[in-house]
Image (cartoon, helix red, strand yellow):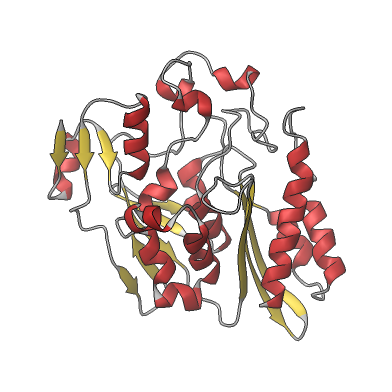
Amino acid sequence: MLKILNNKEDIKEANGEIRAGGTDLHDRYRMGVSSGAIIDIHKLDFGGFVEHLDGTFTIGANVTIDDVGQHPKVQSGYGTLSKAANGLATPQIRWAASFGGSLLQKTRCSYFRHPNLPCTKKGDAECSGLNGHHPNGVIFNKGGCPHPHPSTLATALLVYGATVRTTEREMPIEDLYGDGTAHDRDNMLNENEILTHVILPPAVANEKTAYFRSISRFEAEWPIVECSARLVVEDGVITDAGVGVGGVSQIPLRLNNVEAALIGQVATQSILEKAAKVSAENSNPSLQTAWKVEMMVGTILHTLEIALKG
């Protein structure tokens, strides 16, 4: 059954899986993982881009990923977000998938995506992946599902300190994902709570930005590790930095220790190398995922190098 919502007051009475762009939901239906009613929200007024007088910038959750990547204000003021949006998936998916949906997509764990294997995120009592095959799993293990969170755009929003607005509240984007320990959750939204907008702080002039993903083929592949970075350099000194990493934990991570190793330092190659190495300090990989630590350090270093070059 499909129900198309025309006003947000109907959300509280809705019963089913939410669909905006539908690129993730339709995959799950084809795989036999999801079934039942679909609640379509694409007509709700959660779209658009608004630049406010205080310099903050609001993006509606129903705009497409391509809209985000191509928007002039995002490109000029939030380059990390623009590059991440333009670099993920394929053009066809970016044209269809919603911005909000990209932040709330379900785990890409093969155990979750298999209709006959148990997974706590499908309501089962056990997680097959914990003792299963997960060589591309987490290296910052928070104790939940061993598969990393799939949202590329969340890593970019983390480095800007974005806020998200839902039908019930506003919160820092970190709070949308929690601490990663919940086996049965991909996000911390309540039942029938819908993400409606993302609010970015005022843009910083002349920041240097980059996004890079390490993947196993040339394009259209889920990242092994991905990094979003922004640097502000004044008179050769790094005065501000944001570094977010994906593909390594049950939640998207902002690497505060890497940022601390950069801020206040002269922007040299050796400083970038030292900062990238700091990223591995708190990692706790399994035997299957230990190989990803070096790849993460290299991915972060390469992203910082790209950003510094401008």
Which residue in the rendered view is the most extreme toward the bottom? 235
At 56% across and 28% down in the image, what residue appears? Answer: 145
305 on left or right of 194: right
At 71% across and 55% down in the image, what residue appears? Answer: 299
**Residue 20 visible in the picture:** yes
At 64% across and 28% down in the image, what residue appears? Answer: 134
**Residue 183 visible in the picture:** no
Q: Position of residue 121 (x, y in %)?
A: 45, 25
Q: Nearer the viewer, residue 156 or 87?
A: 87
199 on left or right of 294: left
Split into 4 quadrants, where in the image is the N terminus? top left
Q: Position of residue 73 (x, y in %)?
A: 42, 76
Q: Position of residue 267 (x, y in %)?
A: 79, 75
At 41% across and 44% down in the image, what residue appears? Answer: 104
Q: Position of residue 178 (x, y in %)?
A: 52, 40
Q: Is residue 94 above or below residue 188?
A: below
Q: Is residue 141 above or below residue 50?
A: above
Which residue in the rendered view is the most extreme toward the front? 218
